[in-house]
Amino acid sequence: MNRTKQIFVLGFAIFASFFGAGNLILPPLLGFNSGPDWWMVTIGFIISATVIPLLALLGHAKLQGTMVDFGKKVSMKFGVIFSISVYVIATVLACPRTAAVTHEMAIQPYFEINSLITSTVYFSAVFVFAINRGKVMDFLGKYLTPIIVIILLIIIGIGVTGSSENMVASQYKNSFISGFLEGYQTYDAIAGLLVGGIIVVNVNNSNWDIQVSDKKSIIIRSSLIALTGLFIIYLGLIFIGAKYNFEFPSDISRPQLLSSLATITLGKYGSAFLAVLVAAACFTTAVSIVVGTADFFKELFHDSKPIYIITAAVSSVFGILIGQFDVKFIIDLAVYVLMFIYPIAISLIMLNLLPEKYAGPIVFRTVVGIAILFSIPDFLKFLIPVENLEFLYNIIPLSREGLGWIIPSILGFASANIYSSIKNNTAKNA
């Protein structure tokens, strides 16, 4: 296999790893709500859903390690705890959402079936596939993703060239920040941390005839191809969501909007076909999450096979219990958790990309500690009435927008570097 083909094959594999339910249902509603400001919401969304995940993959290319390695400069214990937290979030929130999307897009419009029945059947099948790992999932992943991408590009192409009336005005106070925070719901930054480690292992274990120094280049170029593909899909879906926002009621759900856009561009049967493909893609994503989580805990407990089975079973039970709720409820529930974990993830990604002299252990501990501390108010919104946190919003810049961690983290980064520099100079002169 020549170098160019290696890069494109890996790039497509990375794209397929990122491509899930959130990538499909989130962008259209962003465009729908932003109207003429669609370009501003796109910039925010692209940064958190494409640029930051790309940086996570570049960080893996540099580290040549696992997700635990991203946090080891804070401490190895922290790296493990952070990794466990990410897997738990993926299992409890991201995974059940795939069942909810499947129900709302492929079951509810055509059959009178209770969502609990859907989630029970869905995750029973997920558990069976997770326990009996085979080539079926590889086959589905290999052929489903390109078919869905082709259909989406057709929808986007027809939608972009079709006629429309004037867009309804934006519902957002700040379109850029709304787009940035909505990007959290794709879980793509987290996916970058998860997928990146797998990519490094696969490249290192491949039989490609390449030098070790070339492996980083292949990962970087493949990642650029994958994330460019996501960027095109996001841009197109946001735009057509905005272009046709006069067509639908203001309370339309994310899955309903995607289905409706498919109906406008492809017709009734095209929409149904897309729903079936999306359901299958959601299923492969769910199995991948359960398998990845079970593999992690299996390795954590010294390659214990019973732990793998227990983890897969527990993940499937959570999937049944949470997956029966509608997509909006799961997304609303996830907001508070993601507002806490994302600042930590973004901080670790950015720090791991920096040269060692600017990101030593002291800097890591300071910045990550501040990110944790200043993201707590956003998490507490779920537990405490917002008015009880008003005093914090008055003293922390950007906290009302959900970005109160950014400026303190930057100041902490600068202060920790100054402290480290003074400490090193003092040690040299002693």
Image (tube, grey):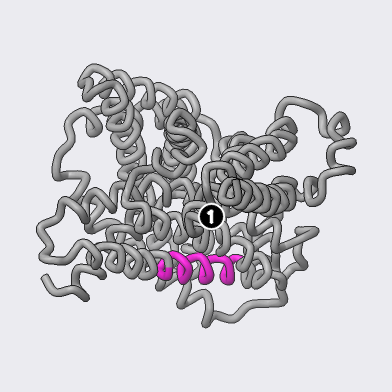
Judge whether 239 appears above or below 163 on screen: above
Residue 395 horizontal side relative to residue 218, left or right: right
Judge whether 65 appears above or below 36 on screen: above
Residue 317 horizontal side relative to residue 354, left or right: left
Report whether residue 112 is seen.
Answer: no
- The residue drawn where x is 74% and y is 46% is 404
Which residue is at the far front? Answer: 430
Q: Could you say where residue 363 lies in the image, as x and y percent from the top left?
A: 59, 46
Q: Secondary structure at mark 1?
A: helix
Q: Could you say where residue 258 lies in the image, as x and y percent from the top left?
A: 51, 57
Let me know if residue 199 is in the magenta part. no
Q: Which residue is mark 1?
A: 350
Report whether residue 210 is seen.
Answer: yes
- The residue drawn where x is 72% and y is 51% is 411
Characterize the magenta stretch by its predominant secondary structure. helix
Q: Could you say where residue 62 lies in the image, as x and y percent from the top left?
A: 37, 57
Residue 284 horizontal side relative to residue 419, left or right: left
- The residue drawn where x is 78% and y is 26% is 384
- The residue drawn where x is 67% and y is 47% is 419
Residue range of the region highlighted in magenta in the rendering: 228-241
Q: Nearer the viewer, residue 257 or 95?
A: 95
Q: Nearer the viewer, residue 216 or 251?
A: 216
Q: How many marks?
A: 1
Give, as a three-letter code, the residue at label 1: Met
Q: Nearer the viewer, residue 129 or 47?
A: 47
